Amino acid sequence: MKAIQCDTKAIYPSKVVCIGRNYVDHINELNNDIPDQAVIFLKPNSAISSEIYDNAVDEIHYEGEISFLIESGKISAVGFGLDLTKRGIQSALKAKGLPWERAKAFDNSAVFSEFRSFGGNIDKLRLELYINRNLVQQGGCDLMLFKPQSILAEVKSFLTLEDGDVIMSGTPSGVGKVNGGDAFIGKVFEQEELIAEHQWVVK
C-alpha cells in the first residue's frame, strides 16, 4: 500500500475520490458540458505518488487540485494534489462514451504534497500552481460548482469513505503538458495564509 503524509504521519488511503468538471473555466477550456451533478471517478491506492513522472509514450497533463483527507467521515486535513491525465487517451475514451480509468487511474497519477490538519474555513481555500516559476493555475472553493461539503455528502450517499481516503475537488483552468525537468510548486491557502506547499521536479 502506498502512503501519503499528514503532519509527518504516514496515512494509507484505500482510494482517491476525484471530482471532474468542477470549475466552469476548465470545463470551457476542454469543451465539455456543464454537469448537473458532480462528476465522480476513482483512482486506486496504486496511483498515489510523491513524485511527478513524464511518460515517453503517452502525453501527460497536469491538473492542480485542492485535496482533502477524510477521517471519521469528515474533512480533517488539506493538501495540494495533481490529478495527472493521459489527455489523448481520455479524449478518445470520451468520444466513444467509455470509462476514463486508462487515462486517469494509471500508476503515479495522483501526486500529493504533505497534508496539514485543518480546522479553518474550507470555503476560503484556494490553490496556486507554478511551473518554472510561472503561475499557471489558480482558483478556489468560491469558484467551484460543487463545494467541498456538498461533494462529501454526495460521495457518502453511495460510497463508503474509509479513514485516510482522499477527495480531490477538481481543477481550475490552465491545465497543460508535463515536461521532463519542469519545476512544479503547488500551494494551498486559506485566504492569504499558506496551508500547504510542495515542490517537485519532473522525473
Image (tube, rainbow, N blue to C red):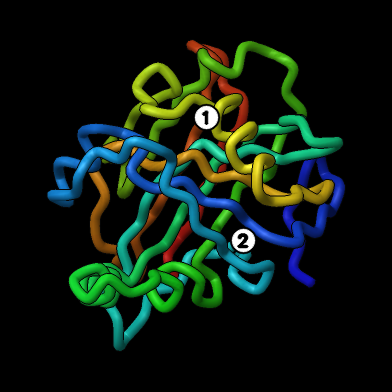
Secondary structure under the numbered disc 1 in the rendered image: strand
For the residue pair 50 and 199, the one nearer the viewer reads as 50
User: Which quadrant of the figure has residue 51?
Assistant: bottom right
Closer to the chain start, of discs 2 and 1, is 2
Q: Residues within 10 Å of mark 1 (few under 14, many from 20)?
A: many
- Residue 71, position as x, y percentages in the image: 82, 38
Q: Residue at x 68, y 44 (%)?
A: 114
For the residue pair 142 and 2, the one nearer the viewer reads as 142
Q: Which residue is mark 1?
A: 188
Q: Residue at x 82, y 44 (%)?
A: 8
166 over 191 or under it: above or below: below
Q: Which residue is mark 2?
A: 50
- Residue 180, position as x, y percentages in the image: 34, 71
- The image shows a total of numbered marks equal to 2
- Residue 175, position as x, y percentages in the image: 26, 49
Secondary structure under the numbered disc 2 in the rendered image: loop
Q: CA distance from mark 2 to mark 1?
A: 17 Å
